[in-house]
Image (tube, rainbow, N blue to C red):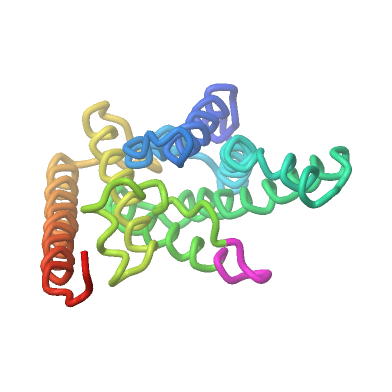
């Protein structure tokens, strides 16, 4: 294994940073805008890693994220499910490990399928949404804590849910991270899988995201106004 493919402490620090940033973007902390950039440290850590190490690093990021996000389940299972606390803690770890597997698979697939900087633009959002969809139904499903839910207080952004569901919001968020990462690579003159990011690609990715985000925002504006108009015309007393 080449030296650049080995895992070092900075890799784990970056992965943990993504895990905590994702957690902070969810309710209770309510720093929803962090979700739009939370994957960048993980992407930086995945640069030039092997398939196996990409999996391990994603698993570590996932464990950090879910243990810090659903920690309250241990108390809930103990207080309301009447499970001994020494039983609810291992269950929490098992659930977090299971959920972290999806981030591990995501990270592994990114290192394998994103063979060029251009593929970084569209593969990560599609991968993430696909895994979220699978997680929502596989093994009876666990549709909690999908990343699109972080935007619950961004009314203009979440209106696309009536067309694409929460997965449309998740796609927009991961696309933002992918575009920001491409711009980071260009500005820092760093490579992805040994290939440099061209200025035209970074600029084009940013322009594409701006267009998509504006479309999402204006649809949200139209939808909110439409709902208000329907409410005004409603025969029911206000």
Residue 44 in picture, x, y percent from top left: 41, 34
Residue 71 in picture, x, y percent from top left: 66, 38
**In this picture, residue 27 sits left or right of residue 104:** left
| Quadrant where the C terminus is found in the figure | bottom left
Location of residue 199 with respect to 158 vertically, above or below? above
Residue at x 59% of width, y 32% of height: 6
* Magenta-drawn segment: 135-142
Q: Tell whether position 136 is magenta.
A: yes
**In this picture, residue 10 sits left or right of residue 128:** right
**In this picture, residue 71 sits left or right of residue 155:** right
Location of residue 204 with respect to 166 vertically, above or below? above
Location of residue 123 with respect to 202 vertically, above or below? below
Residue 165 in picture, x, y percent from top left: 36, 67
Residue at x 29% of width, y 57% of height: 158
Q: Nearer the viewer, residue 37 or 218?
A: 218
Residue at x 31% of width, y 31% of height: 190
What is the residue that sits farthest to the top in this orientation?
Answer: 9
Magenta stretch mostly in which secondary structure? helix
Q: Count of labels shown?
A: 0
Q: In which quadrant of the rendered view does residue 171 lie?
A: bottom left
Location of residue 214 with respect to 93 vertically, above or below? below
Residue 22 in picture, x, y percent from top left: 46, 39
Q: Tell whether position 129 is magenta.
A: no
| Quadrant where the N terminus is found in the figure | top right
Q: Nearer the viewer, residue 171 or 87?
A: 87
Q: Nearer the viewer, residue 174 or 74?
A: 74
């Amino acid at each position: 294994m080449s030296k650049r493919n080995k895992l070092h402490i900075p890799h784990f620090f970056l992965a943990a940073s993504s895990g905590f940033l994702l957690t902070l973007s969810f309710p209770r902390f309510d720093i929803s805008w962090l979700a739009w950039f939370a994957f960048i440290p993980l992407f930086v850590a995945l640069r030039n890693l092997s398939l196996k190490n990409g999996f391990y690093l994603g698993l570590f990021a996932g464990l950090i994220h879910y243990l810090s996000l659903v920690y309250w389940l241990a108390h809930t299972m103990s207080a309301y499910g009447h499970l001994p606390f020494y039983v609810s803690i291992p269950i929490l770890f098992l659930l977090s490990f299971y959920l972290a597997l999806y981030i591990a698979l995501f990270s592994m697939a990114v290192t394998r399928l994103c063979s060029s900087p251009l593929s970084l633009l569209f593969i990560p959002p599609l991968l993430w949404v696909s895994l979220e969809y699978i997680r929502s139904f596989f093994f009876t499903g666990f549709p909690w804590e999908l990343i699109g839910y972080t935007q619950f207080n961004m009314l203009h952004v979440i209106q696309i849910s009536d067309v694409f569901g929460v997965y449309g919001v998740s796609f927009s968020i991961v696309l933002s991270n992918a575009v920001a990462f491409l711009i980071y690579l260009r500005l820092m003159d760093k490579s992805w899988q040994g290939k440099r990011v061209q200025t035209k690609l970074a600029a084009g990715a940013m322009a594409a995201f701006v267009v998509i985000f504006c479309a999402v925002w204006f649809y949200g504006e139209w939808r909110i106004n439409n709902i208000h108009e329907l409410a005004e015309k409603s025969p029911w007393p206000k």
